Image (spheres, rainbow, N blue to C red):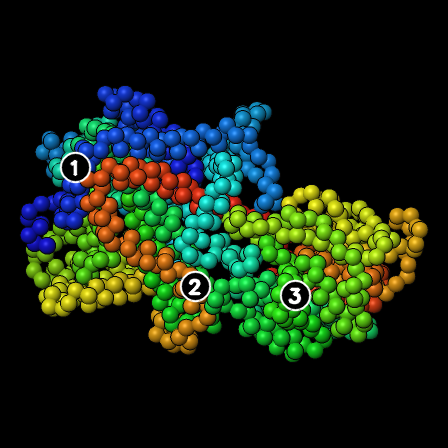
Amino acid sequence: MVFSSLEFLYFYLPATLLMYYIVPARYLQLRNVVLFLTGLVFYGWGEPVYVFLMLFTIFVDYLGGYYVDRFRRSGEECRAKAALVISIVINIGILGFFKYYDFFVSNLRHIPGLENLPLLNLGLPIGISFYTFQALSYVIDVYRRDANVQKNFTSVGAYVVLFPQLIAGPIVRYFDIDEMMRDRRETVALFASGVRTFIAGLAKKVIFANLAGELWAVFRDAPENNRTVVGCWIGLICYGFQIYFDFSAYSDMAVGLGKMVGFKFLENFNYPYISKSITEFWRRWHMSLSTWFREYVYFPLGGSRKGTGRTYVNILIVWFLTGFWHGASWNYILWGMYYCVLLIIEKAFLLKLLEKVPAVFRHIYTLFFVLFGWLLFVFEDLGAGMVWLGNMFGSGVSFISQETIYHLTRNLLFFAVMIIAATPLPKKLFYSRYAGSPVLRNAACAACALLLILCTAYPVDSSFNPFLYFRF
Amino acid sequence: MENKELLDKRPEKTTEQDALLEIQMQTAKQSRITDILTIIAFLLVIFGFGIAVYLKPADTFSDQENRMLQQFPDISSEFEGSLLERIQQGKFLDRLIEGRFTADIAGFYADQFPVRNFFVGLKGMSEIGLLKKENNDVVLGSGGYIVKREPYPDYDILETNLDNLEKFASAMEARGIPFTLAAAGRPMDVLGRYLPANFPDTHDFWEHFHDQTAIRPALRFLNLLEPLRLETESSGDGQYYYKTDHHWTTLGAYYAYAEIMKSFGEEPRPLSAFTVEEVSDAFYGTTWSSAGMKWIQPDTMYYFRYPGDDSDYITTIRDSGESYPGFYNRSWLEKKDKYSSFIGGTTSGNNGWVSVNKKIADNADGGPVEDRERLLLIKDSFAHAVVPFLAYHYDLEIIDLRYFKDSAAKIVEEKNISRVLVLEHIGSYADGNIFGILNFGL
């Protein structure tokens, strides 16, 4: 179930909120039970059978946390470590099996004698990449004594299947949420702020991301002899908009929904496209993932404290994993390595050089390399990606066509709106006026409802499928 | 990196975010009433529509979409019969476990959502408001025209289709039966003058089609685009294609008929030989259904009637066995899909095999028919409006290869066919491999 679907907005969400708030605030534990159960429904919506997998994961982490804590308390460090390792291995094992098994097998098949290894073609359990990391952080944080053990099974469960960020992050760390599981206050201000954040995210997803995606598809699906240089650039830029608006919209919606049930999650995106270097870009893009890798991989490996050589190796490991986390395909690994190289170059000397360059060039430099990153990211077939790259620089295609002009001109306003929406400008403008103006505040309140109605129109329309069996 | 490591394990928060958060928290204090109103508005919408879905009587059929709508799934059937048996057969709660139950709920919400048409129109307005000139691939043209932007043709499929058609055409030629391949223009091919500036033209496709038919001489190609396009370009008020549908109008069909007859070396009947009957002024076509542009006005539909009566002709739907005098099934005029009134059956406007014959005057239905020249018409729905014109000259065996699952060669034999005409819009030659079946039983 995705947040922008009608069954989420008008069935799951009202039902969940109703059940949650029917429980009096003083029974927080019971409210957590509601979150646990509704989370399972949310998780099992598309593939109900995976609910058992989820229960198993929660069970492993519950026991992991329990024993890690117990052994640490009794000073049995080795056993504590063993419990930690077992729970990590099981979690990563499940992720590896469902997400990467086919990838490894299809690569092993190139080795003579192994051609007949079977592929499994398993459906990926929804959000597994996200919730696995989130679940791991519980056991690790307990091990590190950053967080307290949670002896209540449903609370551990509620943490892992918390519906707002289950499918697409932000990857919440237990450390950040430990307190909120035990004590949090749902307030009018927080709920209202959640409503605003959620609806803004919904609009980002439904209006910007989907429409940018449609436009990207127009250029992507054009036969090769219809491609143009301008079309290939515009198409890829559209993809850049799509992935940003889509991903950050999910995070916004998650943050908003979290607020509605009293949680304050950290922001996951901070206007990445206004960055002036690749280093800055990664401080603003999918921050919860970077944080996770920094906390649970980079620092434990020694970070940058063990000399320059070791630092680069650690960066390499982190970026290999970051790439691989995004998908079981070589292009994602390549994408991770691409950023690894760029970041190392920046760290080594480029950042200092960049500081002497006018800001506008730094923006262009950053966006240019991010855009090429998306080229690696979007084409799982590297050959097709390279053809596209060639087309962008005029290899075998004309510069522009009537068709490209048509799509470009009819989307000019949309582009302008998207560009502005990718900067902090609208939010700043809004809040700087918002505070002092009761009129604007009330208008904003009406705007929220209207925007929600508009965002409903899009999924209703896409379900409106004139079935033209008599078509032509 | 180093410093941060030592300082704090929490991810740094950037100053912009801090500033924003601060403003938000400040305003939150000042605006408790606004907050309450925001929450009320939000809850009203999600609970209001969420409950209204159930309160409103569920629709079963959507006229505009021409399909059945999803009802609320019934889980009680899971508990019918012997539970033990069901569990043994793996059928107990299988719909739930396989996710079909939840999928049906999603479908129910999509199909039964309250005031769906309002939302569809709202989305259309939003898209047009963004100046995108299109919604759901339907282009908002001038003069009240809305035109579907069709997908790219697949040239490989085109060649396969033309190869199959050539094979059939050669076989017909060998029997001394002339064969003509006619391609009609789609609205986007014809209505250039009503489309926005820079709308991509389709010259390349037509040129390619021309070239591909030229290297297959057995296919005598008849271009029905050019004459209608030229008429449209030059005429001020003539309407050759519907404004809201993907077909040509009866007037457009007449011009297509005239071109066809001329290519046969025959004289078409003059336009003045027909009396024009307006049969509907509220025809909302298929393009209108998906456009979401509710402000677009409906089309007017005409029949071009023979002088006197056409009831000495009889249309027989072979698929269902029904037949009626004339060419029009007027029951469709009461429904949305009015174009189906041209040689339509009771349940469907599209049928695999339809015959149109001229009866001997004063003969009862189903009696013997006049012995006339017989034309095999292989077609899509563009041909439906042309049939009444052609019927004046020929008895017609009309097959639609998407629904016809028999041997065309058999019809040629049994019905003593003396001429073959393929009449489809150009897109259908490059859309799916539908012509292979022609050579079945050849």
Instruction: Identify which residue is drawn at 56% across, 59% down.
Output: B143
Q: How many marks?
A: 3
Give the image quarter of residue B411.
bottom right
- Observer able to see residue A460: no
What whole-number distance in Å separates the C-alpha atoms at marks 1 and 3? Answer: 66 Å
Whether residue A229 can be seen here: yes
Measure the C-alpha gap from mark 1 to mark 2.
Answer: 44 Å
The circle on residue B389 is none
Q: Position of residue A263 (x, y in %)?
A: 23, 34
The subunit carrying tag 2 is A
Return the residue nearer the eye: B23 or B81: B23
Towards the viewer: B356 or B429: B356
At label 1, the amino acid type is Gln
Residue nearer the viewer, A68 or A273: A273
Q: Amino acid at mark 2?
A: His
Residue denoted by label 1: B26
Q: Secondary structure at mark 3?
A: strand
Q: Are marks 1 and 2 on the same chain?
A: no
- Dot 2: element: helix
Give the residue pinned by disc 3: B184
Determine which residue is flagged by label 2.
Answer: A407
Chain ID of residue with mark 1: B
x then y, percent, for residue A60: 27, 36
- The answer to which quarter of the image holds residue A395 is bottom left
